[in-house]
Image (cartoon, rainbow, N blue to C red):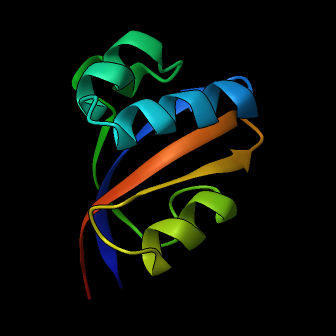
Amino acid sequence: MPRATARHILVETEDKCLDLKKQIEEGADFGKIAQQHSKCPSGRNGGDLGEFGQGQMVPEFDKVVFSGELNKVHGPVKTQFGYHLLEVTSRKG
């Protein structure tokens, strides 16, 4: 079964997500932005979700994690939890 490691930032609005993405693309540190803005408990760890298998996350999230380009910030990705910025750090299987 494919596995991946990723980190993310979860916020309430698409506008906030786009604003944070712009900051990261202009050189802001993904981990620091996650610590300051993410609503997910993983924000404390810079958004790090650790390693997980395909199908463990919600479908919209899974699709990006298992098909998106590595080490690139993807998003906004809308799920029932809000809007995510995602960075896939590794993938295997």
Quarter occupied by the C terminus: bottom left
Question: Residue at horizontal 32%, vertical 53%?
Answer: 6
> Relative to 42, does residue 84 appear above or below in the rendering?
below
Side of 10 where 26 appears, left or right: left
Quarter of image, res 25:
top left
Quarter of image, res 27:
top left
Across and down, in percent, residue 73 comes to: 41, 53
Across and down, in percent, residue 63 comes to: 58, 72
Across and down, in percent, residue 20 comes to: 50, 29
Q: Nearer the viewer, residue 14 or 46?
A: 14
Residue most extreme to the front: 26
Quarter occupied by the N terminus: bottom left
Across and down, in percent, residue 72 comes to: 35, 61
Side of 49 where 13 appears, left or right: right
Side of 57 where 14 appears, left or right: right
> Relative to 84, does residue 11 appear above or below in the rendering?
above
